Structures are given as C-alpha cells and as structure tokens.
Image (cartoon, rainbow, N blue to C red):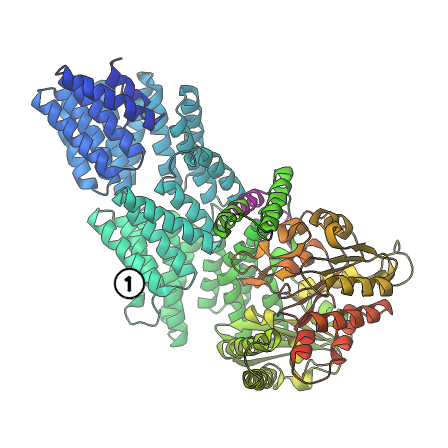
Amino acid sequence: MGGADHVDDSPAGKALRVVTDDPARATEMAEAALAAARASDDPAEETLALRALGLAALEQHNAEQALRHLRQACRVAEAARLPVRAAEARMSLALALAEAGQPQQALREIDAASPALHGLPRARLQMQRALILDRLGHFDEAMAGYTDALAVFRRGQDRLWQSRALTNRGVLHTYRGSLRQAEADLRAAEQGHAELGQELALAQVRHNLGFVLSRAGDIPGALRWYDLADQYFARTTRPAVALMDRGELLLGARLLPEARAAAEAALDAARASRMGLYEAQARLMLAEVALAEVDLPTATKQAQAAYRLFSRQNRPAWAALSRYVKLRASSPDEPAHLRQARSVARALSASSWPIPALDARLYAARVALDRALRTGQRAKAAAVAGELSAIRAASRGGPAQLRARAWHAEALRRIATGDTAGARRALNAGMALLDRYQAALGATELRVMAGAYALELASTGLRLAVHGGQARAILRWSERWRAAALRLPPARPPDEAGLAADLTELRRTADEATRPGAASGITLLRRQRAIEERIRARSWQASGTESGTASGISPDQVAVELGDQTLVELIDVDGTLHTVVVHRGRFHTRAIGALATITAELQALRFALRRILTRLGTDDSQAAAATAAKYAVQQLDAILFGSIRSWLGDGGLVLVPVGALHAMPWALLPTCAGRPVTVVPSMSEWLTASARRQPTPSTTTGSPHQRHPVLVAGPGLAFAEAEVQRLAGTLAPAEVLLGPAATAEAALQALDGAPLAHLAAHGTFRSDNPMFSHVRLADGPLTVYDLERLARAPGTVVLSACDVGLSAVHPGEELMGLSAALLQLGTATVMASVLPALDSAAQELMVEMHRRLATGATPGRALAGAQAEFGGGLDAGTATAASFVCFGAG
C-alpha cells in the first residue's frame, strides 16, 4: 500500500503517520493541519495535509474522495515547484487510481514521480509499482519489485515499509500457490505491525493469514484468522476485499447462501466506495456462487459484467477467469464450446494461477473426451489422454482439492485409453484423499458441504459402473460417496462454554418473541440472526480427527445383514434414476425413469397432503386434494416399484433414497403399506445403526425400550401433555418432563444415554439453515447444535412433531437436520414426521406404536403396525400416520 513515508513532525506529517493506524483520527488531524497551512500560506504543509486526507479516505474505502484530495495535492505541490512533494503525492494518487480500477493511469503517475525520488522514497515508489503490476497480473515483475524494495527497506531500517512489502509479497505468494513462503512473509509482517502499533494494518495481515489457510484447504484455521481480523473491521467498516475472501472460503465449503450474501455485500461495498478494482472481483465471485447454485442466468450476467470491467482495467488473468465462469454456465453441446474452453485454459495457464489453470485444463479435457467417446473417435481420445497426463503431473502437490483433481485427471486418462480398472483405482484414491480432508473438518455443516468436492469423482465412478451394468459395482460406487459426513463423530468447537452461552441466549430471544409486550418482531429477528451467526462461526472453528472415513462397504456383508429384508437403493446418474435391489443374496439393477418426473410427482403429493392435513379450503377443495394425492401415490408407486416388484419379496424394506425423495411419506405407497420400512441416507449408515441396536454383554435383560424412557412435552400443543401422560402409564418407570420443567438443558441431561426418548413438541425444519431446525421446549428451541453437545446419544428417538423428519440434502446425499444429527451422534433409530401432523391422530399413532415397542417389536415393525390401524383411506388421520418415517436401523 502507499501510506505515509518518513516525514517531519509538522501537524500534517503527524496526520500522515497515523493514517494506517487510525484513519478517522488522521482525517481530523489532517483537516486541522490543512486549515492552518492555508492560513499561513505553507504549500509544503498543505500538500502533506491533502495527502493525509486522501490516504485516510482510501483506508475508509472512499475512492472518489481520495482521488479528489490527492489530485489537489499534486496541483498544489507542482504550483509551488516542490518536485519531491509532488512526486510523493503522485505515488499516493497512483494507489488510489489502482484501487478505483484505473491501473494504466496509476502506472503513468508512477513513471511521472520516478525522476524526483531517490533512496528510500524511490524504493517506496518501486513497491507501489509492483503492487499495481501485481493487480494487472504481471506476477514475475511484481515479485521482483517487492523483493528489491524490501532489501532497500531493510538496509534503511524502515520497519513500517518492510512490513507493507512483506504483506504484499505474502499475498502474491498465496495466489501463486507458494503457501509456505506466503505464511512466512505474513507472519513477519504481523510481528512488525504489532510492534509498531498499526492496528488496521495488523487486522489486514491477519485476514491475509486466513486467506493463506483458505487456499491450503484449512477452513477452520482460515475462519479463526478471519474472525480475529473482523474484530477490528466490525468496529470500523468491513472492506470489500475482506468480504470477498470470506465469501470465497464459504463458496469452497459449499455454504452457498452465506457465500452469496458475502459476494453481494462485497459488491455493495465496492460500488459505494467507487472501488472499481474490487467491483469487478465481487461480480466474478457472485457469478461463481450463482454457478454453484445452478442459477445460470445470474452466473452468465455477472461473469459478463466482470469480464467487461477486467478488460477495461487491462487485467487479462481476471478476465480469463470471468470467461471460464461464463463458459461453465453454458451448454457443453454448443458447437464453439470446446474451442472456447481450450482458449480459456490457455489464457489461465499463462496467468501463474495454478488451481484455476488446472481446473480449466481439466474441464476442457473432459469436454473433449466426452465428445470423442460419444462419436467413437479413438484417435482424438488418445490425444486427450496426453493432455490429461500433463494435468495429472501438474496437480500432484498442494492442498487436498488440487490433489483430488490430479486423481480425477488420471481416472479420465485411463478411461480414454480403455483401462477401466485403472480408472476405478484412480477414482478410489481421489475419494480416499477427500475422505481424509472431510474428516479434518470439525463442524458438521462444513463436513456436509465438503462432500460436494467428491461429486465429480463419484459421478465418473458411477457412470463407469452403470455402463458396465453390474449391480454390485453400482452399489459400491453409490455408497462410496453417500453421507460420508454422517460416518464422522461431531467435533467440539474450541469454545464450548461460549457456544452453550450463545444457545441459551438464542432460546431466551426466541422465548421473548412469544411473550406479551415483546419488542418488535424485526428487532427480535435481527437479534436472533446475530446470535445464530455467532453460533455458526464458533462451530466452524472446530477441528476434526484427520483419521478419514470408511472406504466403502462389502456387498456380501450387506446381503448377510439384510436377512429377509430387501434393500432398495436409488441413484441419480445424469438425471436418470437407477435402482439397486438386494434380496436374499441376489443383486439386481435397473434404470427406472427420469428423476425430474419423480420429484414433480412427489411435490404434487406433498402439496395435496398439506391441504388435507391443514384442512384448508372448502369440502370440494379437500376432495380434490384427496383425488390428487391418490393419483400421485399411484404414479410414484408405479414408477419406483412397478418394474422391480418381483425382486422385493414380502419382508421389510430398507430404502436409500436420493435427493428430494428423503421427504417421501413412504407408508402411503401401496408397495410399502403394512411393511416395516426403514429410510437411511446410505447403506453404510444402516449397517452402523443396526450394530448400535444389537444388545451387548453388559446390557441388562429385557427389551431396551422398557428401561427408563424419557418423555418430554413442549408448550403450545393441545395434546402434548396428554400424550406424554398416556405414554408414561404404558412405559413406566419413565423420566417425565412437563410444563416449565421441560427445558432444553433438562431435556439434554435426560436424553444423554437414554435408551428411548419421546419428544412431543412443536417442530420446525429450517430450510434456510438446517442446523437450527428444532423442537420447541419450555424455554425455547432445542436445536441440532444443542444435540451435538450430548456425550452419549439416546438409543431410539421419537419426534412427535410436524416436519422435523425433514433434512436438507446436499451433494453426496449429505443430510442436515434433526434426524440426521441424531443418527450421526449414534442414535440407532429416529422416528419423525416429514409433513404437518394432526395432533389427535398423532397421539393415537404414538400410543399404539409405543404399545408395540414395549412388547419387543422393532421400531420399524411397531410403526408399520400402528400405521396399519388407520386403514387404507386418505384423510387427515391416515395422512398423519403415513407422514411418520422410521430412519436408521428400523
């Protein structure tokens, strides 16, 4: 950056020295100095004061005001024939022009200033030139400029400018992938700024240390540095570049709503401050987030806008990145797509940015290979294999995401040469590497989102397996990437006490909103959102075990463990739903239809059932809803089970759905009616949950459901306390929490290690943030974050509430929600609803189900038997019964 140099102790000189430490105070000092200089007709002092005002405005992210002050400083110095003062003002003006997105004009100001400066001032000018060249993408020249200037600063013992040069060079090392050198430079800069008391500069360096860890794939570590820096930024103004770096990290972790919010905030900040440099980058990041969200119109629009700005600023590397995003938002079947992909890959390869360049090269190679294989052009496929070999060699080092790309390139190379066995080995190696990366993340939310890195590897493996038509291979690959996060125990955040305090405050705020005379809804909502953000930030800083996850399952083990049950695993391969069925040791596979057709029918069914359950509308509209629901049920049953019914046997079903089908009320489908049906995110999770359910030598005799169950009734439900009291009679002795005693902390203590828990409470599934899905207790919500604090999971959990069986589904069939959290904690079986529930019908269902559990029935059989008592019609009672699903072991 281009702040103060060594100046005299005049009032303006003192203001200039304070700029990077306290820009607001520097502004006050400089305004007073400017008034005094003009009153005494002192152009040298006036120039210094104007420079201080301009640089302080730049630190406060106001490029327009900075340019005005700095141009005036140049005019005053030139009019007074003060060549050194004019050159120093030009140096500061160059920085402001670069930040405003005018780098060529900035270089002209540097060239105009150069003849008048010598020694340390000339070295500062040289570093300023290097910074502008850095932003233009001339990285070799920039690196040499930083290093040469740094040597002069060291000889001259200019510690402030040493720290600035180290900061700039460290950031450039990061972009070039030299992360060790980057951290070394930034650590030295951090020490220098700390010793000099430069609070703003210290925050910027700490943010940059987070940027280094972000590029290394260390999400918790990066967030810790970002949060440390943000303690300063939050008191002043969050700069656009800090918002963009945080957004990039969130995008990498697939926290897409948060990444979009960060990108939009960065764009707003850049436009408000007229920082054209950062406006272009913010638009590019917004395009990348939109692409990840499959919002292709927004991705195309923002990428094109970013490309125009980067081209105007003469920043070819950034312009190439914008072209790459726009390209990926278009169809690979367009005639010019491959030519454009190769052009972008060449442009990025010339940029000295290794990861984007390799991404683009891999993308172009995949497009070329797909075309060659579709058209049977083996010679072209062989040519692509050579390019993939080069990509593999270039990707071997660096963070996990880069090494995973190398394995993907190797797998594609093997496919190009017809070596499918070698391709499978390469894909497995890449998946194993990503397993270890995912395990090293502590927060459930980050682990779940990190599953998206495996999507392309797994999709390639699945396509290979489907092409071979082998059910066992398809099952192995489907399981290889499904719900890996659920196989990892939750990690504790570094500040558990702070997390507990935040959760208590969240409950207090939510409870306050329900009381008469509460603060306005908007005020409480803002407070709630702020608390939720603190909770999430704490959880993201947890570190994992780095021990990896299981590499897969044995199909033969699955067949043995199923016994007389039947596995039906559903798999999405490029929009077509495939199924693998395992029954009595036999494996079958079949493509059963377009996934879009099935999800459309499920949406129609859920809409009709909600009309029935909420009893909205006239009798005629209710009858129409029932007719629509019956039609959707028949269609779904025919599509999902019609072609495979002969493989299913007549025993229980273990269903592994895909995507939106996790929200299916399965008991309504004729094929499932009356059968024990268990729904799991993966077969691996079913095996694990089933093992938890088995009695151990230390277990006391008798059914585990007869030993001190926990029964909790939340507020606001007319039937909750009556339901719990009826169950208490059936399940005595039991620990019962009613009324004011049914608090979150009391419930957590009771749930810890309980064999059976039943919670009759209002439930909410938070689609905007599934980790805050909850049941409402006497003092407020009991969330997923609360449940992750349990030392021992309850054995079986019944959630007698609306919608709390729902989960958000992310790439890799990773789930987030209450039921998924309990399974991850170690609960064997969760029974919960995926729709609203009629309270009176839910009570009767629960009483009958627990009566069957108490006689020794498995949860799946107990639920199926209780549901059968409601008959085969389709009204609010039968819809309520069918909305409950058995998740886990069954």
Residue 795 in sight from this viewpoint? yes
Instruction: Describe residue 778's horizontal placement relative to residue 346 as left or right.
Output: right
The picture quadrant where one finds residue 803 is bottom right
The residue lying toward the viewer, choosing from 503 and 413, is 503
Measuring 54% from the left and 57% from the top, which residue is drawn there? 451
Could you say whether the residue bearing mark 1 is in a helix, strand or loop? helix
- Residue carrying label 1: 340
Question: Measured along the vertical axis of the image, is residue 154 above or below residue 281?
Answer: above
Measuring from the top left, give residue 878's x and y in whole percent.
68, 79
Say if the magenta span includes residue 231.
Answer: no
Instruction: Describe residue 258's horizontal placement relative to residue 613 as left or right.
Output: left
Measuring from the top left, give residue 752's x and y in whole percent.
76, 50
Q: Residue furthest right?
A: 701
Instruction: Describe residue 484's horizontal placement relative to residue 395 as left or right.
Output: right
The residue lying toward the viewer, choosing from 143 and 832, is 832
Residue type at tag 1 = Gln
Instruction: Describe residue 875's horizontal placement relative to residue 87 as left or right.
Output: right
Measuring 90% from the left and 56% from the top, which residue is drawn there? 700
Viewport quadrant of the C terminus: bottom right
The stretch in magenta equals 532-549
Question: Neighbour class for label 1 at 10 Å: few (<14), some, many (≥20)?
Answer: some
The residue lying toward the viewer, choosing from 395 and 501, is 501
Measuring from the top left, give residue 625's x and y in whole percent.
56, 82
The residue lying toward the viewer, choosing from 835 and 54, is 835
Viewport quadrant of the N terminus: top left
Residue 138 in sight from this viewpoint? no
